Amino acid sequence: MAVKRVPMTLLCGYLGAGKTTLLNKVLTNQKGYKVAVIVNDIGEVNVDASLIAKGAQITDTSSIVPLTNGCICCTLKSQLAQQIEDLIKGGKYDYIMIEASGVCEPMPIAQELETIKPGKLDNVVGVVDAARMVQEFAGGDALLKKDMKEDDIESLLVQQVEFCSTLIINKKDLVTEEQMKKVRAVVTRLQPTVKIIETSHGDVPVEEILATNRFDFDKVYSSAGWCKALDEMEEETGEEHVHKADGSAGGDEDEYGISTFVYYRRRPFNRDKLEAYANRWPANIIRSKGVIWFEDDYDNSLVLETAGRQISAGFSGMWLAACSKKEQEKAFAENPQLKKDWDPVMGDRMIKLCIIGQNMDKKKICDELDQALGE
């Protein structure tokens, strides 16, 4: 007998954003569902679990499963999967909510949840604090800090906004309408198609959290602002040029100074020069991501990613140009677009970075990146 697939909602958001308050409201009005809750708190004592039980006035606390002393996006992933499978097999619950720790990135957790066969990831809900968004992004001052560290929260806020199927902008009562407009401008750049709900005190209709059928991994991933900008970029003639998201030269900007453009080159970076530039990466760049290559490694492509002041580059795969002719022809047959973008000298090797920021001097940024190119 097949085990019934149980829908799941993943709840993410930075510390203090209002996840537990939202969860309590859902649990006191479950719309007929029997909801089990998995709570992840980094400390050895799971404070959130007791707050949920008290706030939702739950007497049977067996529905709350604490995962403590670790993070479910890394050390506790296998434990999370096992707990969910046990809950599903028990047959007592027909919906599962997972409240992630405030320091979790949502994408690796969603990847793990997608592997749980009896379960179905229905919704990834990101909760952000409107006042914090103003402080970290929309106001601009925090982005210009000279002493910003790699573990500052900008990176987490970006990840939590980008990778969700429902975004709750909470605590709107703590900001002005003008500040909310700036927050919307930032969010729209980072995630232009997500379902956005603006609220105070976590007051969100349960039907926006449970049983939405809203999550699709590929759609959520590809709907991030950086991804859409790269996909929509149309190549122009000429060896080196800068595109904005809609394919024309330059960049587009709204009234709050939030803009997006794509830096595109057919030359590689010099590894040492780029590393030196990374140490003085412009603080008003909120997000950038894309593919790059280095002059001392013609075979491999890397993904360069920045969020706040956190900068990383990881192996993405071999360039098709580094593969055999047979492999190239097979790839062209399967994806004709590859041939359209093929350079007679460089093949598919390129630098293509989507850059999202506030009050950016695009020409200066491009000139500085150009200085980091190889000879």
Image (cartoon, helix red, strand yellow):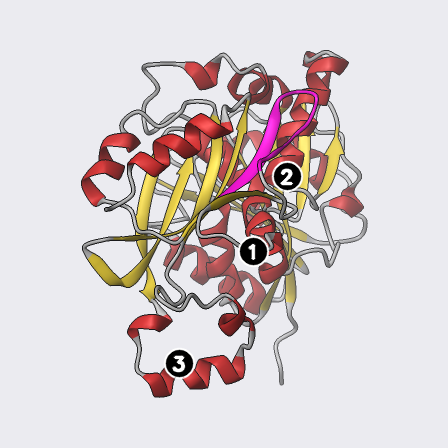
Residue for badge 3: 328
Give the amino acid type for the residue marked by disc 1 in the picture.
Glu
Residue 256 % position (x, y): 66, 20
What range of the chain is rendered magenta? Answer: 250-263
How packed mark 3 is, by other alpha carbons closer than 10 Å (few <14, some 14-19, many 20 or more), is: some
Residue 222 placement, left or right of 362: right
**Marks 2/1: CA distance?**
61 Å
Marks 1 and 3 close (CB-CB < 8 Å): no
Q: Does residue 201 lie above or below 157 as drawn?
A: above
Q: Secondary structure at mark 1?
A: loop
Q: Residue at x 30, y 24 (%)?
A: 280
Q: Secondary structure at mark 2?
A: loop
Q: Does residue 95 lie above or below 338 as drawn?
A: above
Quarter of the view holding residue 323: bottom left
Can residue 54 be seen in this snapshot? no
Residue 295 % position (x, y): 23, 53
Q: Does residue 287 lie above or below 254 as drawn?
A: below
Residue 211 % position (x, y): 74, 55
Q: Residue at x 50, y 64 (%)?
A: 86
Is 87 contained in the magenta span?
A: no
Give the amino acid type for the residue marked by disc 3 in the picture.
Gln
Residue 270 % position (x, y): 23, 44
Residue for badge 2: 59
Residue for badge 1: 235
Marks 2 and 1 close (CB-CB < 8 Å): no
Quarter of the view holding residue 305: top left
Give the amino acid type for the residue marked by disc 2 in the picture.
Thr
Which callout, 1 or 3, points at the residue further toward the start of the chain?
1
Is 256 contained in the magenta span?
A: yes
